[in-house]
Image: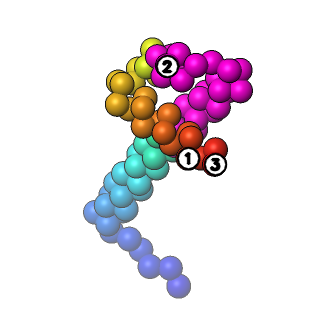
């Protein structure tokens, strides 16, 4: 038999659900951006762009700083191997 939930308990459950959804959305967004960046790098490499040009384009197109762009470039190399 189902038990009734107090309005306060229901409020806490709803609040927890909203927080979980927000965290999930943020994680999904980060994964999506990372996947797009990796596809971008791989596409540019297949078209024989120079590493310097790819890194500059990363910085401009995705708003990354030099260190972040370098990390993605390195990650793309290890993912390829």
Q: Is residue 4 above or below residue 22?
A: below
Q: Which residue is mark 3?
A: 81
- In reply to whether residue 66 is colored magenta, the answer given is no
Residue at horizontal 64 percent and vertical 44 percent from the top:
80
Q: Is residue 16 left or right of residue 30?
A: left
Residue at the extreme left of the image, as rendered: 8
- Depth order, front residue of 70/60: 70
Q: Which residue is mark 1?
A: 78
Asked if disc 2 and disc 3 are in contact, CB closer than 8 Å, the reply is no
Asked if disc 3 and disc 1 are in contact, CB closer than 8 Å, the reply is yes
Q: Secondary structure at mark 2?
A: helix
- In reply to whether residue 55 is colored magenta, the answer given is yes
Q: Which residue is mark 2?
A: 52
Where residue 26 appears, as percent x and y from the top left, is 43, 42
Where residue 69 appears, as percent x and y from the top left, is 43, 29
Q: Residues within 10 Å of mark 2 (few under 14, many from 20)?
A: few
Where residue 49 appears, as percent x and y from the top left, is 63, 18
- Segment colored magenta: 31-57
Q: Is residue 31 left or right of residue 5?
A: right
Is residue 12 visible in this depiction of the protein? yes
């Amino acid at each position: 038999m189902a038990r009734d939930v107090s309005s306060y308990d229901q409020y806490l459950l709803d609040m927890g659900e909203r927080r979980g959804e927000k965290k999930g959305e943020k994680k999904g967004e980060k994964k999506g951006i990372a996947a797009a960046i990796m596809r971008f790098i791989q596409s540019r490499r297949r078209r024989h762009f120079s590493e310097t040009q790819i890194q500059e384009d990363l910085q401009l197109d995705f708003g990354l700083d030099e260190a972040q762009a370098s990390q993605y470039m390195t990650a793309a190399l290890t993912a390829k191997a």
